[in-house]
Amino acid sequence: MLKHIDNIKSQAMEECFEEHCEVLRALSDKTRQEILMVFVDAKEICANDIAKHFTLSRSTVSHHLNLMKRYKILHSRKQGKEIYYSINKFYIKELINSFLEKLDSYC
């Protein structure tokens, strides 16, 4: 009986952490970590300037930026033909706080 309860609890915990895990998986990539480091000196950077920091193709950098935007790690805004990115600090803080609260409730 306890094993069954543990399995149900484990499954519920996994479902609650699904969003958190997706974002953490997105941030586990070395290139995406390096992209975040580009924002250390600037609050907002255009995609072309971000790409200049890498030897990767512009389309590869764009792929990483789009993925980070999809997981709400980055904000973006378009100005003319250029796209500007910034870190979504509010969402990241909320995600971390939510993760800790859920962790406390299950442990």
Image (tube, rainbow, N blue to C red):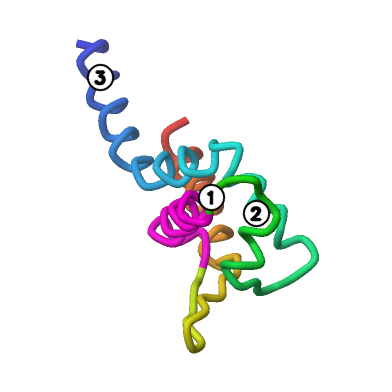
Callout 1: SS: loop
The percent coordinates of residue 48 (x first, y second) are 60, 67
- The answer to which of marks 1 and 2 sits earlier in the sequence is 2
- Tell me the magenta residue range: 58-74
**Residue at screen point 48% across, 49% down:** 60
Asked whether the residues under the numbered discs 1 and 3 touch, taking CB atoms below 8 Å apart as contact, a structural biologist would say no
First in sequence, mark 3 or 2: give its number. 3
Q: Nearer the viewer, mark 1 or mark 2?
A: 1
Marks 1,2: beta carbons within 8 A = no
Coordinates of residue 106 in the picture (x, y in percent): 42, 34
Residue in the picture at 23% in, 25% down: 8
Q: What amino acid type is highlighted by mark number 2?
A: Leu
How far across and how far down the image is residue 94, in percent? 52, 60
Question: Does the magenta portion include 57?
Answer: no
Residue found at the far bottom of this picture: 80
Q: Is residue 52 above or below residue 28?
A: below
Residue 84 appears in which quarter of the rendering? bottom right
Note whether 86 is above or below 53 in the view shown: below
Circle 1 sits on which residue? 57
Q: Secondary structure at mark 3?
A: helix
| Magenta residue check for 59 | yes
Name the mark on residue 36: 2
- Which SS does the magenta portion mostly show? helix
Tell me the amino acid under the disc marked 1. Ser
Badge nearest the viewer, 1 or 3: 1
Q: Which residue is mark 3?
A: 7
